[in-house]
Amino acid sequence: MLCLVFWHPTYLIQAIFLPASQKPNIVQQEAADNFVQMLDLAPPEREEALRPEFTLNPVLERFYSFLDRKSRRSDADVPPVDDAVKSIIEPDPQLIVENELDRFCSQFQLKINPKKDKASKKFWRDKPSLSQEAAGNEAGDDVKNGISFDSLVARKTEQIGSLTPVQDFESMLARRDSDEWVPKAIREMKKLITDLLDSSYKGNTYHKAMDCLVALRNGCVQQEEPMEYNNFMRELRSNCQGKRLNDFWELIVSKNVRLINKNEAAESDVTEEEAKGFLAKADGGRNEASEKPPEADVDEMEQLLGEVV
């Protein structure tokens, strides 16, 4: 039985879509454009190379050439690659400009990503709170959580679970096999936050909901989806401030979790002053509410449990 395997890629160009903060600068973009232009098979003032009607399939050509050789001599060895086949499968030296190639490589430096020790398994309550790490800083700052891009992509997360929602959310945002993952991740994260608040009993899910809210803000900034986050924050203020979930809204104000302004995402309709005023109005409303006579605070969950007993 005879089996031949032949694989020789000529060029391999892979485009990775990055957020605005990681887009190439002008010099890098120019170097990439010149590099791609250098690989043009039909440059000006030159005959087009590798025209389909005059180019053999290198795999079939080599296979049948050896098959013919084997039929004449049963002990024939696999011959070296013919020069005609090499001209098809190898880059044309006349197209490769060393200066452009070196310039392209110098503009995109690769760094070794050291392997980190495998963390021990912890329960949610034992893990550091993202909202606590972000305290004292703006909620839009990146949170260093030790999750690499490769590990996020390798997980292939398809939905956000309640056990590790932040990691699931970041993993879905990192997927590049479909355009549907980003809107789906944002939609499921908003639903999870709402569900956590609806099922809250005396604030037992507030910290987890806050971690999810901070992650949602960071993700919307990176993916340039400020309207999704800002509209959700307006809904939260409407549903929480002065109502049963007012304690959670006060937690948002204390953590300084603002709207996404135009300086963070160009698509935002909120200025930096408006983002600050969004929480300032909440503070003012809270002070006015404190001047009014306190109303009886009836916990719906506690009342329901009382009726069952």
Image: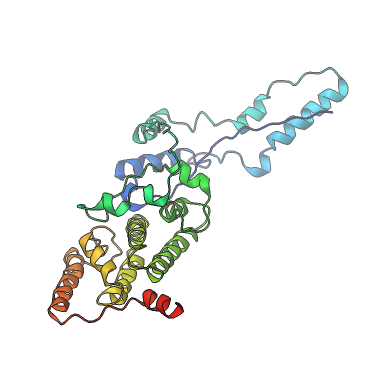
Looking at the image, the residue that sits furthest to the front is 309
Q: Which of 25 and 300 is in front in this view?
A: 300
Q: Using the image, determine if residue 65 lies above or below residue 43.
A: above
Q: Can residue 158 be seen in this view?
A: yes
Residue 255, compared with residue 8, is above or below; it is below
Q: How many marks?
A: 0
Residue 58 image offset from top left, x and y in percent: 68, 34
> Residue reaching furthest left?
291
Q: Where does the C terminus fall, quadrant-wise?
A: bottom left
Asked where in the image residue 201 lies, by quadrant, the reply is bottom left
Name the quadrant containing residue 241: bottom left
- Determine the residue positioned at 40% across, 43% down: 147
Residue drawn at 49 percent across, 46 percent down: 153
Q: Is residue 137 above or below residue 267?
A: above
Residue 56 or 101: which is nearer the viewer?
101
Q: In which quarter of the image is the N terminus?
A: top right
Q: Which of 155 and 64 is in front in this view?
A: 155
